[in-house]
Amino acid sequence: LEVIASVEPRIAEATRKELADQRSSLKLIASENYASPAVLLTMGTWFSDKYAEGTVGHRFYAGCQNVDTVETIAAEHARELFGAEYAYVQPHSGIDANLVAFWSILAHRVESPALEKLGARGVNELTDVDWETLRHELGNQRLLGMSLDAGGHLTHGFRPNISGKMFHQQQYGTDPVTGLLDYDVVAAKAREFKPLILVAGYSAYPRRVDFAKMREIADEVGATLMVDMAHFAGLVAGKVFTGDEDPVPHAHVVTSTTHKSLRGPRGGIVLATEEYAPSVDRGCPMVLGGPLSHVMAAKAVAFAEARQDSFKTYAQQVADNAKSLAEGFMKRGAKLVTDGTDNHIVLVDVSGFGLTGRQAESALLDAGIVTNRNSVPADPNGAWYTSGVRLGTPALTTRGFGHDEFDNVAELIVHVLQNAEAGTTKAGGPSKASYLLPDGLADKVKAASAEM
Ligand code: PLP
């Protein structure tokens, strides 16, 4: 930090404060974790300075021999870790990984004379009319994914997102009463809509998915099954999700982030069957530019960590802790979406406390508990205020929390929510954002969590 401070002291100070904040609060954001010192240090090296567009052995820049070594090792570890036929480790983030997957599937699946011409003759040979045809052929395809309010991700066909614009999209949800995925409903939608791509995976669904069933649905309608395991990749790597709950043997293409339950650097990966590998391998130049070589190196270190037995223990503890947290809430009368969890996510419906998700999130933050508000099925408060709070166990499990600590966490959260009151607007009407906490409560909760 001294070196940074000598150039821009405000950044050094913000970095120091971030460490203090992350250490002194309860980090329950389901998509966050604490990467190891080895992963963090690997990101801070001179690989950051190297350009390496292309693929291993076929770069558009000279001097990429060491990046080739890094990318080869990272891909090898990813294949071994997940039992995948092919791994592409260049995407900078989860969204990049999904874009690479979409374009690879389009390139592989869409029968396009213009695309064939592109493959055969190269970019410079295509006329303006060819490009127009190509735009039409690629832009006319269908995608079916899980809706955002049911727990899907923006990139799974949400209208305002690029995925909802580049495809004709439809979405499947969860049962409004049970909050669970209904595979018959997904199958009926798929039969009617006939998507080219069926996307499975989620950001806020507290249950496991049967990927064998999803593959059956995809096969029946001739769709490519793409699974976005960004959230639960750590549980797949740690062999908590096996058989039908492991997406890799069932999906044609699997995407992931590397920084959530997988506990690596911020980044993305795409896994694929041999059939899809050649088109995924063209992620650059189709979607990406130069890979982040220092992050690919850190991915290799994180994958090596995840291949150790200790990571299996960690992943199992993440899932066990989520159960302890869920039970801690339910025995204290809080309502959970799907009445529990079997992954790393717990979704609390806070309407029973007389609060919106926004009020609950802010009140908890005051008390040093970092969460994010989230819609519940058929949410009356919409996507901005919401009626839920999403919690995840990966980060605090890395800090060594077990059953008793997570029961305490549930107790502290219920205590804050029971004592928080919905506030009013300046005009005195009901507010969905403001809230009141009794004096001293936030400090008491902070002191209690510092003891854990
Ligand atoms: N896919 C899913 C399921 C996610 O939950 C997220 C992030 O929250 C992403 C993709 C996007 O990842 P990133 O923020 O790295 O682009």
Image (tube, helix red, strand yellow):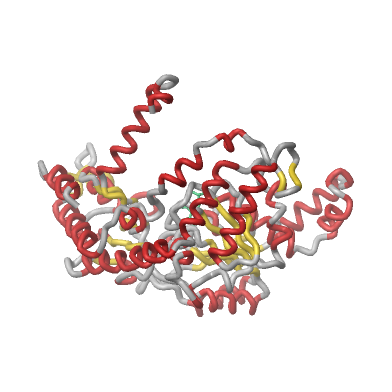
Q: Quadrant of residue 375?
A: bottom left
Q: Quadrant of residue 403?
A: bottom left
Front residue of 316/217: it is 316
Front residue of 427/162: it is 162
Q: At which x and y percent is residue 42?
A: 50, 42
Q: Quadrant of residue 314?
A: bottom left
Total count of labels = 0
Q: Tell me the quarter of the image containing the N terminus.
A: top left
Do we see residue 160 in this rendering? no
Q: At which x and y percent is residue 25?
A: 26, 45
Do we see residue 312 in this rendering? yes
Residue occupying the point 86% across, 43% down: 124
- From the viewer's perspective, tell me whether residue 415 is left or right of residue 10: left
In the rendered image, the vertical position of residue 422 relative to residue 142, given as above or below: above
Residue occupying the point 48% across, 74% down: 242
Residue occupying the point 50% across, 41% down: 43
Q: At which x and y percent is residue 59?
A: 74, 43
